[in-house]
């Protein structure tokens, strides 16, 4: 190894970017190496929900808030069984947890789940790099002895093809259909179990990488919920006799996932099935009606994103996690923009004027994030109730 890339004293972790940049730090969590796209998230809380969000598959998350891990980890604050983010980059070392809800240190949680952490990094500088140059490909690595083959890591970063053109929904989706009937969480009681309304409208959720709190909000709004895999056909969806169909969030390039998802959504639209989409589901709905999607320069990831509603001009503070977006200029005449990002003016919601379908780019279920947009679940389910009646 050349002197220029020898680890500084005490370095047990490294981030190697495809442009040759090297960021040293202190590794924690699992040992090993992982390659993916390096992004940043501005949320101050909810790091466990972020790490377990399937939409982060293929990504390494830089947290801009310096104190990550300080409330530990527990079995309730997860959005999937296992973490899907490849690793995380933080400013300060993970400390002992300070929360009565904690059952495990965050670094121990990552280690148990095979995810890599890198501490001691100037995360502000890394965030600025991403904002200027766009989200880079990189490799995060942790070795307790501080032994790294930087040349090999650089080659790995440069060989990775990137998220554009990559379908990841199949990798994180459920492999078979199942019922979901748990509701929302309350302090001291946990999640409401077996709380689905047996007489409520039936929602079939297509799982492109969905978060559990989406399902909980659908149940909380009065729906019965059945989840089907991302690759479910039109006939397989309709076999469940849905009153409405939910299109979930998920990772990867919507154009790649759309190869098999868009034809199904078009058939659902043709027969008049009510549809509600979130994040990747929003992008797939946009593609299904003839719109186009594009990869964003840096994406939107955080729990503080202002979105303006076109109907009444009100502003919602929202949770976001997406690196692709729908091109508003590409939408047909029957697609009406309903929400817009106040950060960059990108499309944040749409509805069809001739079909019972709407979608939003952000995450109204939060986890983490504000609950300004919970009303969308009530709006969707209540419409199904009227239709079913």
Image: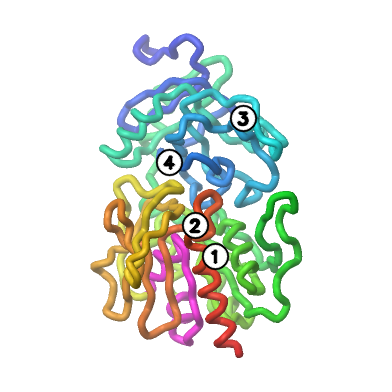
**In the structure shown, which secondary structural element does the residue marked by tag 3 occupy?**
helix
**Quick one: quadrant of the N terminus?**
top left
Pointer 4 or 2: first along the chain: 4
Nearer the observer: mark 1 or 2; the answer is 2
Q: Position of residue 115 (x, y in %)?
A: 58, 35
- Residue position for label 3: 107
Mark 3 or mark 1, which is nearer the start of the sequence?
3
Secondary structure category for the residue under label 4: loop
Residue appearing at x 46%, y 53% in the figure: 319
Q: Which residue carries the number 1 mark?
A: 230
Was residue 276 drawn as part of the magenta stretch in this picture? Answer: yes
Q: Secondary structure at mark 2?
A: loop
Give the quadrant of residue 32: top right
Left or right? Give the position of 78 relative to 383.
right
In the image, which is nearer the foreground, mark 2 or mark 3? 3
Residue 38: percent from left, percent from top:
41, 38
Which of the marked residues, 2 or 3, is nearer the chain's N terminus? 3
Residue at image mark 2:
250
Decide which of tag 4 and tag 1 comes sooner along the chain.
4
Q: CA distance from mark 4 to mark 2?
A: 19 Å
Residue numbers of the magenta segment: 264-288
Quickly name the residue at label 4. 42
Cβ atoms at labels 1 and 2 below 8 Å apart: yes
Label 1 Cα crowd, 10 Å radius (few <14 / some 14-19 / many 20+): many
Q: Is residue 14 above or below residue 269?
A: above
Q: Residue at x 55, y 21 (%)?
A: 143
């Amino acid at each position: 190894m050349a002197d220029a890339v020898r680890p500084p004293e005490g370095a047990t972790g490294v981030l190697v970017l495809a442009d040759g940049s090297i960021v040293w730090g202190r590794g924690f969590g699992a040992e090993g190496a992982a390659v993916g796209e390096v992004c940043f998230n501005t949320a101050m809380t909810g790091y466990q929900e972020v790490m377990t969000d399937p939409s982060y598959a293929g990504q390494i998350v830089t947290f801009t808030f310096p104190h990550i891990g300080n409330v530990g980890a527990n079995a309730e604050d997860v959005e999937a069984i296992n973490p899907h983010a490849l690793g995380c980059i933080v400013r300060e070392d993970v400390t002992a947890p300070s929360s009565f809800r904690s059952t495990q240190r965050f670094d121990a949680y990552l280690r148990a789940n095979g995810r890599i952490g890198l501490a001691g990094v100037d995360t502000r500088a890394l965030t600025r790099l991403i904002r200027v140059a766009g989200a880079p490909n990189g490799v995060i690595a942790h070795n307790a002895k501080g032994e790294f083959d930087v040349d090999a890591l650089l080659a790995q970063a440069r060989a990775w093809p990137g998220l554009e053109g990559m379908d990841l929904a199949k990798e994180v989706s459920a492999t078979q259909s199942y019922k979901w009937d748990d509701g929302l969480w309350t302090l001291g009681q946990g999640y409401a179990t077996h709380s689905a309304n047996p007489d409520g409208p039936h929602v079939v959720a297509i799982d492109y990488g969905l978060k559990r709190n989406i399902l909980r909000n659908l149940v909380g709004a009065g729906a019965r919920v059945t989840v089907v895999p991302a690759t479910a056909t039109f006939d397989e969806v309709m076999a469940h006799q849905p009153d409405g169909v939910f299109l979930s969030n998920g990772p990867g390039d919507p154009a790649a996932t759309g190869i098999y998802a868009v034809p199904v959504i078009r058939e659902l639209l043709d027969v008049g099935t009510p549809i509600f989409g979130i994040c990747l589901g929003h992008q797939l709905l946009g593609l299904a009606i003839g719109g186009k999607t594009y990869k964003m320069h840096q994406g939107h990831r955080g729990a503080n994103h202002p979105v303006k509603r076109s109907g009444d001009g009100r502003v919602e503070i929202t949770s976001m996690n997406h690196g692709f977006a729908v091109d508003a200029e590409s939408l047909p005449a029957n697609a009406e923009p309903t929400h817009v990002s106040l950060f960059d003016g990108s499309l944040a919601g749409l509805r069809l004027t001739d079909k019972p379908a709407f979608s939003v780019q952000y995450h109204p279920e939060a986890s983490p994030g504000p609950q300004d947009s919970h009303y969308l679940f009530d709006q969707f389910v209540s419409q199904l109730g009227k239709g079913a009646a």
